Image (spheres, rainbow, N blue to C red):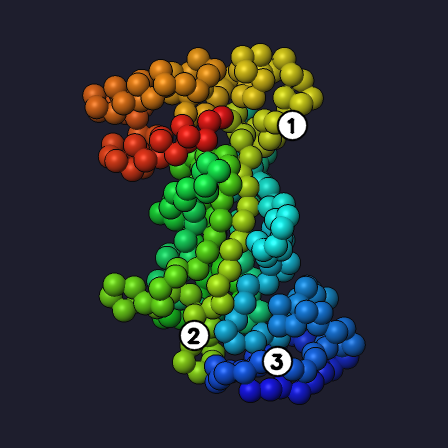
Amino acid sequence: MSIANVNATDKGLRGQVIANASNGAGAWTGSASIGGNALTGFPTYSNLSGTLGGGAVGLVPLHLHFQDSVPATTAWVGNPKPTPPEMLQTEFNHTPGANGAIITPKDVTLRFYGPVRSELIAGAVRVNMLVGPSDYAIDVTPYCIITGNSATGGSASRTLTIRGVTGHRFMHGRYKIIPIPATTGANGTRFLYSDNVDSKPDVADFDYRFNLLLDCNNDGIADRDQIAADPSLARVNGVYLDECSQNGGCIADFNGDGFVEFTDFDAFVTAFEAGNPSSDVNGDGFLDFDDFDYFVAFFEEGC
């Protein structure tokens, strides 16, 4: 397959242009422009949809538009890697502000170059928290709300929205969102795929990264910024606000003495074996080996 030049009206593009709708083999060899604006780097061009009239030009299989997503970023490739966008943990899971503080809820909105759909929208993507130098992945998808187009309805949409479940406190740290690697689930369920095209192939692989910042007192301000402005707010270890919980949100400092050492590991194992609710470190309401794996991962990373 080869495609000649595509040039849209100078009034811009409000709808969708899909190239290779039959999902054939080949490569794009031409150029594309909208309203006189060349789509730089097509098919993964950086132009924002707002500058093109609101629409998009997509090449099947459809890719994620990193720059048009919210928060905007770039593909996790090359060296050095790009700096991931940041938001507060309390913003991501829509936590109400404490003592009159206003926290503006924020979602991650993935925007693609064309319409996408899933037969299991709650599992359209996987959200992993990354821990340690080896990027040990902890699946936190069950604690996320994912919205988008399901197989049973909805008009064509290029977006998928992810946010945390209110009430589940996400740990601060590094996160990534990836498509489910398999095309079909155990019951033949299709995950995230290109919509309105022949054979409906899976979307192109992507790796979207973002970071969550600690806001342990739910005041809508990153703790690191408060401490930088007034170091006396974190007298114990210079990292966590004194007014917060015993360990300031550091799971690995299980005994809350300001250090991460084997006494913390011993304290966790003792609590875990005794069925103490404090050992439910992943906050899912159950004491099981998921908590053990969770704690070990954080212990290896430290605080």
Hey, which quadrant is residue 278 in on the image? top left
Q: Residue at x 70, y 65 (%)?
A: 47
Q: How many circles with numbers are drawn on the protein?
A: 3
Q: Which residue is mark 3?
A: 28
Hey, which quadrant is residue 30 in on the image? bottom right
Vertical relation: 22 (above or below) 164: below
Using residue 154 as the reference point, say whether residue 282 is left or right of it: left
Vertical relation: 99 (above or below) 235: below
Using residue 286 as the reference point, say whether residue 235 is left or right of it: right
Q: Residue at x 54, y 12 (%)?
A: 236
- The answer to whether residue 170 shows anywhere in this view is yes
Q: CA distance from mark 3 to mark 2?
A: 18 Å
**What amino acid does circle 3 point to?**
Trp
Camera-side residue of 136 and 98: 136
How packed is label 2: few (under 14 Cα within 10 Å), some, or many (20 or more)? many
Which of labels 1 and 2 is toward the front? 2
**What amino acid does circle 1 point to?**
Asp
Vertical relation: 181 (above or below) 218: below
**What amino acid does circle 2 point to?**
Pro
Q: Which residue is mark 2?
A: 201
The image shows residue 242 at horizontal and vertical percentages of: 53, 15
Mark 3 secondary-structure assignment: loop
Residues at marks 1 and 3 touching, judged by CB atoms closer than 8 Å: no
First-in-chain label (3 vs 2): 3
Q: Say which mark, if any, is on residue 44.
A: none
How packed is label 1: few (under 14 Cα within 10 Å), some, or many (20 or more)? few
Q: Which residue is mark 1?
A: 225
Q: Residue at x 55, y 87 (%)?
A: 1
Which of labels 1 and 3 is toward the front? 3
